[in-house]
Image (tube, rainbow, N blue to C red):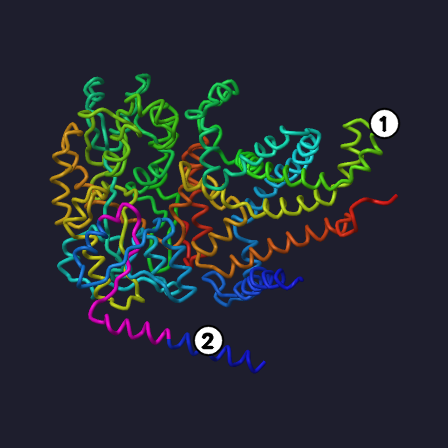
Amino acid sequence: MIAPYLALLIAFGVVPIIVAAVTSMEPSALNPGGGPLNYLQALQDFRFLPALGNVGVFLLLYVPTMLIVVAGMSLLLDTVRGRWNVSLRLAYIVPASLTGASAVLVWYFLLEPTLSPYQDILRALGITQGGQIWRSENLAWIFALMAFFTGAGNWIVVQYGSLQSISEDILEAARIDGANAWQIGWHIKLPLIQKYIVYMGILVFAAGLQVFVEPQLISSSVYPGLAANWSLNQLSYSFAFQSNNLGGAAALSLMLLIVCIVGAVFVIFRTDFFEGSGVKEK
Amino acid sequence: MKRLVIGIVAVAAMTLSLAACSGTTNTASGGKPTVTLWVDTPRVPQAKAYQKLMAGKQNIKIEVISQADAQTKIALHNRTKSGWPDVIFGSAPDTAQFLDPSNGFAADLTKLVSKKIFDGFGAANSDCKFDGKYYCLKNDLANTVLWYNTKVFKELNLTVPKTMDEFAATALKLRGTGYSAGAIGDQNYYASFLQPSGCPLAAMPKKNTVRIAPSDPKCTRVAELVQPLLDAGVVDKRSNFDAGFIKDVAQKDKVAMTFGPSWFGDFVIKPAASWGVPAGEIAAANMPAWGSKPDNMSGAWGGGVFTVSAHAKFPQAAADAAVWMTTSDAMATADTTPTFPAYGPANKLWEKRISADPYYASNPYPAMAAGANNISQVDRPVRFAFNAQIGSALQVDINSGKSLEAALNSFADSLQKLAPSSGYTVISK
C-alpha cells in the first residue's frame, strides 16, 4: 500500500537530501578544505542576515493572512448553496492560474503608476512614480501580495472541501440548539477543520520560507538587482552559480529544510494533527 | 535474487552495446565534426548562417539560451561532466569564471585562433585577455558616447561639451528649462561616469587580487561633479528604462543630452515604444574627458563574447566557429545583430550601414569608434557578480534618493564582501 509513496519519497526526498548533505561538505574558493565550515560560512555571508530578515517579514505577512483569509472565505463559501457556489469556486481558482513569471508581470503592471489601470487610486495615495513602489522596504509587502493572490484561491477551494466532510447531523444539531450561522462557523465548523488549517499552515510556511520566483524575476526585469539575494533561496542559488560554491548552497538549503521540518513537527505535536476523526471529544 | 542479477547484467550489457553503437557512429562521422553553439536569441540568425555555410562539412547544432544563464548552465554541466556546448555566447565576466581552474570550461584560444584575427580585433578584444592569454572573442562593443539632441541644443544655444566640467556646466544650464541631462539610476552611472573616470572597483593589480577603492580621487570626483546636477534636478535619479522617466521626460523629447552606450541610439532613443525621439534630432559626440589624455576614456555597458569549450571534441572546429561568429560579414549585416562589431573589418561594413541611417541628425559612427578604441581598462572582468551588485546596491540606492557618495560606498562595500568568496584578495585603499 505504502510502496508507491515510499518509492517516490526515496527518489525525490531522501536521495536528494543525502546528495545535498554530501555536497554540503565540498570545498569552495572560500573554504578550500571543505567540510562543515560551509554551514558556518553560509550563515556568515553578508547577505544572509538581510535575506533572513526579508523572508521573516514576508512570512509574518503572508502566513497569517493566508490562514485567516482562507479560513474566513471558505466558511463564507460554505454558506452559499446551489449554482452560485460552483461559479464562485471557479472564480477563486482563476487568480491561481497566474503564477510565476506571469504573476510578476501582471503585478508589475498593476503597481507601476505609469501603466496601472488603477492609476487614479495610486495617484490619490500620492504615488506617481514607480520608484515609490519598487523600493527595498516595500518588497516584502509586494511579494506577500503576489503570493497571497496566487495561492489563496486554491486553498479556499481545498478548505471548502474539508468543510464538506463535516457531518450534516452535527450542523443540524447545532441549528436545533439555536446557533446562528456565525456561531456555527466559529464554534463548530472551524474547530472541526482545524487539522486541515494546520496542514495548510505547514505547507504555506514551507512555501513561503522558500520564496524565490517573485524576487528573482523582479530582479531580472525593469529593476535589475532590486531584489537580488533578497530571499534565502536566492542566496543559495547565488552561492551555487555565481560563486561556484555548491557546498555553501547545499548547506544553506539543508538548513532551510531543517527549519521547515522543526516547524512542522512543532505544529503537529502542539495540535491534534494525527488524532482520529478530528472531532474532539470533550 | 539470481534473476535480479541476470537482469542487471543484461541491462548493463545492453547499455554498453548501445554506447559502443554511438561510438561507432561518432567514428563514422569522424571526418565531419559536430560543433554545438549556445547562443542567445539575437545571435541565432548569425548561427544559422554559419550552419548553412558549413552544411556538408560540419554538423553545426544550435541551442538558444539566455545570456544570463550562461554561468548556471555551465556550472551544471561541470557537475555532470558532460553535455557542454563547444561554443557559448556570454559576457566577459562569464569567461573570467569559466577560465578559473575550479570551473575549467574556457579553452585558451591564443594558439587556436590566428594572429591575423587577433590583430583585426586590436584593442577591442582586451576584455578577453587574461594573464596574457586569450580566452574569448569579443562580439560587439558597447562603449559609451554622449548622445545629444541637436534641436534642443540649437534652441538653447548650447555647445557640445568636450570635458566633464563643460558637461556639468551645460547640464546646469538646463535648470528650469524642463530639459534633462539624462538618467543615471541604472548601470549608466557606472558605465558612463565611474568607469570612464577610472574609479577602481574591479581593478586587478595582480592575479586574483582585486582593488575596490571608493575613496580613490577618481571615484570621489564623480560624485562631486554629478551630485549637484542631481540636486538641481537636471540629472534624473530614475533608470533610463523607468516607465515614469520614459513617459515624463524621454517621450516628451525632453532629454537634451545623455551618456549612453553605442546601442542606445538604435535600441533606446529611436524605437517608438521606447523613447521615440523623432528622426533628425539625435547625434552622438565623443565622451567628454575628465582630464587630459589618458584621462579621457569611455566606459562600456554590455558587449558580448564567445567562449570556446576546453572539452570540445574538435577544438579547432569550435574555435573556427567562434571566429566566424565574431568576424564574418554576416555578423555586421544581419538584421538582428546591429550592435557595434568588435572586429575591425566587420565593423567597417557596419559603419556603412549606420552612417547611412537617416534617423540621426549627423553620423554617430565617429564618436562610437573614438570611444570604442578608448574604453577604460581600469576595471577588469571578474568572477564575482559585479553587474548584479550594480543593480542591487548602486542602482537601488540612487533610485531611492541616497547620495551618490553613499550609494558608491555601499556598492563598493558589497563588492569587497563578495570578492573573497570567488577567491580574490581585496585591496580597499
Chain under numbered label 1: A
Q: Residue A260 carries which label?
A: none
Magenta stretch holds residue B139:
no
**Residues in magenta, as a range:** B18-45
Give the quadrant of residue B294.
Answer: top left
In the picture provided, is B134 more to the left or to the right than B244? left
- In three-dimensional space, the C-alpha distance between marks 2 and 1, rounded to whole angstroms, equals 71 Å
Q: Residue A178 carries which label?
A: 1
Q: What residue type is labelled 2?
A: Val
In the image, are marks 2 and 1 on the same chain? no
The spot of residue B348 in percent (x, y) is 12, 45
In the picture provided, is B97 more to the left or to the right than A138? left
| Neighbour tally class for label 2: few under 14, some 14-19, many 20 plus, Cα within 10 Å | few
Give above or below for A228 relative to B152: below
Give above or below for A247 relative to B252: below
Under tag 2, what secondary structure?
Answer: helix
The spot of residue A113 in percent (x, y) is 45, 25
List the single residue furthest toward the bottom.
B2
The spot of residue A214 in percent (x, y) is 50, 41
Residue occupied by mark 2? B11
Chain under numbered label 2: B
Under tag 1, what secondary structure?
Answer: loop
Magenta stretch holds residue B34:
yes
What residue lies at 64% left-to-right and 52% top-to-bottom?
A260
Q: What residue type is labelled 1?
A: Gly
What residue lies at 17% left-to-right and 29% top-to-bottom?
B359
User: A40 and B343: which one is in front?
Assistant: B343
The spot of residue B158 in percent (x, y) is 21, 22
